[in-house]
Amino acid sequence: MPFPFTLPTTSSVLLSDFFESATHPSLPLTATTKRSVLKDALKKHKRLSPHEKATHLPIVLNAITNYLPYLLALNVASGFGDVGIEQVDLGVKTPLQVEWRSTLAATLPGREAPRLRLTGLHHELAFTLSTLSYVHSLLARSSLRMLYEATALSADQRTGAIGAAMKHLLEANSIHKYLLSLPTVSASRDAPVDIQPSTISALASLALAEATLIVVSKDDPFASAVADDRNSNNHDWMYKAPSMPKVRVRLYANICLAAADHAAQAHGLLASSRVDEDLLRYTADLRQTARGKAARLLAIDADQSGATGEALAWLKGARKELGLPFSTDEGGGGGGKRKGLAGLKQNWQERREDKRVEKGGEWGMDGGKLEEARVVESLEVKWERQNRTINVQIVPAFEPLLAALPSGREYHSPQAYQPPVLDAQALALMRAPLDLSEAVFRGEEEDSGEEGYGSRSGAGIGAFPGTTGDYARAGGTGNSYY
């Protein structure tokens, strides 16, 4: 958690072939230069290893931030609007044609979706802003990953990491909502699945659900205690038992239910479109995690009131919401012990998830279900032993408790996205006539080059820089007989 989006790649485009400006002749060429930098950053990012991608995200973010003011200026000027306080006379020679690779469309296993040829500046703007929101979600993942690493974190470090992730997720939500507010994007019906209005709305709900759910993670000592229990460098669990103020428990349960509602809305919007199965499954798992966490918090509230039997019933309800197998056929307790093939499968899934966290792979694809399951089972073991030895109470049925779950409560009030505006001084400099002796920067990456992890474009192995054309045997145009 959050979802590990794959950043799309794009082709090289000379914007001056599609736009011309009588008042600001340098605007299309300057925008081309900024776009070429973004194109190179996206292609290089795709070839990096999982560990290198996390450190390369700020470079991609900076490239998008530098390109967006020029792209938005072209979008406004093409609609006969003013850019800031200046009037830009922009003529459209021919509709813009670009290529972007779809990363959310459903594809066959082992195959990569082809790059789609799109017509219109609104598609370029939609893909660029969507990529920016993906970058913010990935930056949130990078902040949260340190919570599951082997190093022990202080309370301030944990709060700072969760706060940074929350900020990035709220920014992703505001970007998606801004996209929906653009008439050309919201009214587009021929757009790919990545930038369809239903998909954008679903991703906005998903980002808000993730941002809402990690509010509870910031002050949830039970989840952090279970995580620290697996950390050999942390020994707080030996002398410090987890506790949560009673006034916060029910509030956090309502917040979790609000996150579940947002995740359910995202799942419903995505279920009707042909999106990637991993994303669709993630939204369903995130909803289950949020509802299971709410039931677990209500169990803690019942235990603090002395109702251990009701607390155990709430934990059974949490098991039901998380889709976990019960220990007995009757759906009873059993102290959280795992039995049978279902227990073996859960153990195997948890070990595989731990290895993914260590290696920096695509961890968290279950929406946090496995981590929440560990918390539920640890509380079951403790309370079952307590109920059998100290205060014996009857464990009621959990179905009526789940039917009476309270309504959700919103925590965040997302702010509207403020798109970057082209600086007035930079716009004034583009009134200068074109210098035909200077070639526009088109990027260092080739459009036809391989984009997969580990590939490298440019000079061949052992070739001296600048002599790539002398080693053309691989392309079939060399003069060698071999």
Image: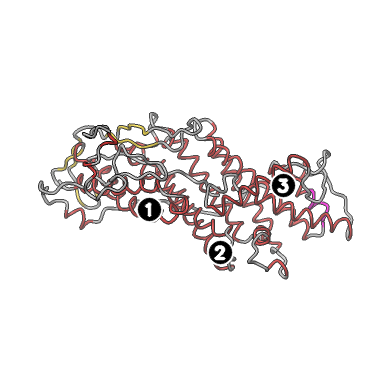
Foreground disc of the pair 1, 3? 1
Q: Which mark is residue 318?
A: 3
Q: Is residue 140 above or below residue 153?
A: above
Q: Position of residue 310 (x, y in %)?
A: 81, 51
Disc on the earlier residue, 1 or 3: 1
- Mark 2 crowdedness (10 Å alpha carbons): few <14, some 14-19, many ≥20: some
Three-letter residue code for mark 3: Ala
Please give the residue where the numbered disc 1 appears in the rendered image: 61
Residue placed at 20% from the left, 58% from the top? 425
Q: Position of residue 210 (x, y in %)?
A: 55, 49
Please give the residue where the numbered disc 2 appears in the rendered image: 159
Residue placed at 57% from the left, 50% from the top? 356
Circle 3/circle 2 CB separation < 8 Å: no
User: Which of the two residues, 54 or 121, is positioned nearer the viewer here?
Assistant: 54
Instruction: State the separation of the CA atoms marked 1 and 3.
Output: 39 Å
Please indicate whether residue 467 sits to the left or right of residue 221 in the image: left
User: Which quarter of the image is occupied by the C terminus?
Assistant: top left
